[in-house]
Image (tube, rainbow, N blue to C red):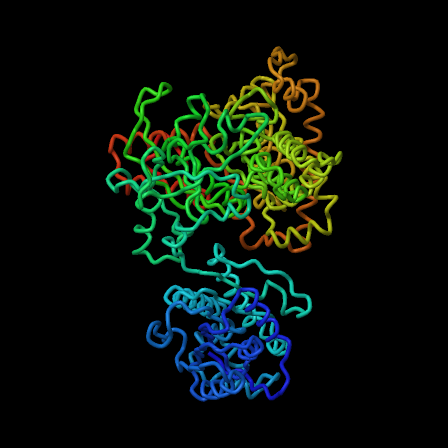
Amino acid sequence: MPSKSVTQTNTIEPTPYLWRKLFIENQLPTDGIVIEVAPGYEPKIGNALALLGFRGTIFLIEPDQKTACHIQNVYQQILPQATVKKVIKSLQEVEVGVDIPYGADALVASHPFDDMVIASVVGKIQFFSQEKEDGEKISTRIKKLYDTLKDKDYAHGIETTVATWKRFITKSKPNYFIASQYPSHTLTIKGLVKRQNSGFMVLKQLKSFYKNSLVPQHQEHSFGFKGDPRWWIIVKKSYQDLDFSLKQKPLAIKRLGKSIFVPQQARRLHPKEYDIVYVDNAYFRNLENDTISKYIRNFAIVLDNKSLFTSKKIITYADRQKDKTNIGLSGNLGSGRAVYYGDRFNILGVGKTTLCKSIIPSHSTGNLELIGAMRRLVLSRWINYFTQRAPVHPVLIALKEAVHRKWSNDPIPLALLVRVDDGTLDRPSHVEQSPHLLVNFKKTLIEYAKLDAEYFAYRIMLGAWSTNNYSLDGHTIDLESASFVKYRGPYYTSTSKYPHNRFGHEALGFLRVLHQLADVKNIRNEEVDNCFYKERRQRLGRCFLSLLGVDEALANVFFSQHQDRVMSLSDQFENLSKKINARKTNLNLYMSIPDDEDPSLLDMSNLFKNLAKLYKSSSAETRAIEYLIRKTALSQIKTSATNTPISQAEAFIWDQAIITHDCMDDFLEKTKKFIHALFQLLVSLDSEKCLNTKSGWGYRLETINQSLPTMFELNTMLKSLAESYRLRNINPKTLSSRINKLCELPKNLTDKFDATVFHKI
């Protein structure tokens, strides 16, 4: 690690004041323990601690002896009431518990990452002393060294630096980890772009790794560019102490109020009563491997409200909800089979809560079927691959108990499914239960509009609207009726009666939820529908660019400059892709729909994922027609339609989606115009360097436009897995492997889904 230049000034620059502000906001105790990595010669953090009146203990990790002795002396002068200890080692060499203590109040570092990347590549500490002597100039000797560094060297340095920090944080378990990595004036002057970017990449990867523990930050305008949250990482309790977490009351109580929650007594299951069949290692990545299994067993609980309370009993919480339509609650007074446990977890399938009052068999058992649990888990992983709109389910526990139900000839295996509550379970039905709750109605409207646009773009449907199926922050919650779709026709899963449960038309359901929420909060806004569709249209335009394989950052820039043009084309994309023939409108995804019976007239996804091979080819637009139009469905358009709508939804579909023989020529003409405009857009995207046609465009097209199993196909797979597990034809380890393989399906384009040969998956 480098030795930074000496600061010879009696005044304190602005940066320490920013550090001081962060220390105050994150409640650093003035008599606590701080570990600073690579302070060099600049006492930025030391000055911040002096401003704070720090009188605790600070450990300075600095590998260069001369630098370490100097900075220790400086800190002792500016922090006379503190104990200052130096550790003359690199971060990799520090022994936790010997050189420094466990559980420091804060682990801090000022602009360390690019230095550590270079140190790991060059391997010579004196290099930084030599570089320091150059000031803002770069000597021929140093320039030659930089010129020898290849991209793979920087990549190795980034990987090594990230791994070093992760290992150190895991071992030392600080309460806070705070570090900065803002743009360096010196590196900019010297033209060391790759070095500068290497530090940003380390910061980005650490933020991604610790995303579950990041402390929200705000722009500190008074500190200039250094006050931009992009250049900082603040992590609270990066290690996960589940024992501590599960002893806390739900954080949702602070958000929603005590009146929502009803205590429920639970007991822990014996290990012989269950198998752990899925663990999201990415979620628990901050736990050491040998402790994960131990902690996961804490989630194996069932309700036991009838027994006398003892010290071994566990207190969980059911949440009251209200819905004047009674669509989502089905007679229950709130959660009938789910409880909050600990500060941020919610467990489904624990048994009947005291709020379970429904007389509908499927809503009054308190149980969660294993197949339903697996479907929720797999779908949430698939949805979050495309857009982060589903809950995180870190644990699935299969119960060895199976129950008999009237609707099944075979016993049904049960499960417990854990989901993370970080606000994604706060629902409009909670607000209807407690109308005094504060709600940012405009934000909820915008998020619902974005969600609906994203789901249409990526071919996802929820299938059943209700005020307890969507969170206030724009997440889908209960995925019982959710499904991916193959084309973009008006499919359904839950019921065929209403158009707002059909794919492509679920915006109507979102608007019902918003109007119901507005009534509860006495919001009188005649523009709800217009605002919703305006936001939805803009979001679909951005998603449309992603379907064309444009990187998100480039898409945002291009969209801002060509918004009207992009939205006009995305409007055409949506309108055309919804069209079907009149032969079949009963598109129930619970059932198998053979491809030659699907009435969808266009396959936009097939066109988009082949754009890389079509673009700039001869007769591109003519060939595009071949990829886009489904000839069998088009040939089934008859001169006269004989079917008559039998429900409100079918009448709506006839009006909005069906192409008759009289309309076919116009439809085909609009389709050709769309293709022409699409290729013109590609030319513009290419000219503005948004396609990167030489690297990765084709893969991005295939990835974002891939087809995933529909409900029938996925259910067929999961039924086989659940039955095989019940009969003990497969063991828990095998079931776990199959679930993980299914979860990873979107990442594995070469894997072909075939429910009839599920053992290959």
Q: Residue at x 62, y 87 (%)?
A: 9
Of residue 158 and residue 673, the one placed in the foreground of this image is 158
Q: Quadrant of residue 566?
A: top right
**Residue 726 in the image: x percent, y percent?**
28, 31
Name the foreground residue: 138 vs 150. 138
Q: 15 or 181: which is nearer to us?
A: 15
Disc tally is: 0
36 shown above or below 727: below
Quick check: can you spot residue 750? no
Relative to residue 554, is residue 637 depicted above or below? above
Say which quarter of the image contains residue 663: top right
Q: Is residue 363 visible?
A: yes
Q: Residue 7 in the image: x percent, y percent? A: 58, 86
Of the 4 image quadrants, the one containing the C terminus is top left
Image position of 59 (left or right of 667): left
Q: Is residue 357 above or below residue 552?
A: above
Residue 78 found in image quarter = bottom right
Q: Position of residue 474 (x, y in %)?
A: 58, 42
- Residue drawn at (62%, 14%), measured in percent from left and top? 645
Apparent side of residue 727 relative to residue 104 in the rendered image (left or right): left
Between 758 and 279, which is closer to the camera in this rendering? 279
User: Is residue 689 positioned above or below 538 on the image?
Assistant: below
Where is residue 210 shown, x and y percent of the image?
A: 47, 58
Judge left or right: residue 350 versus residue 30.
left
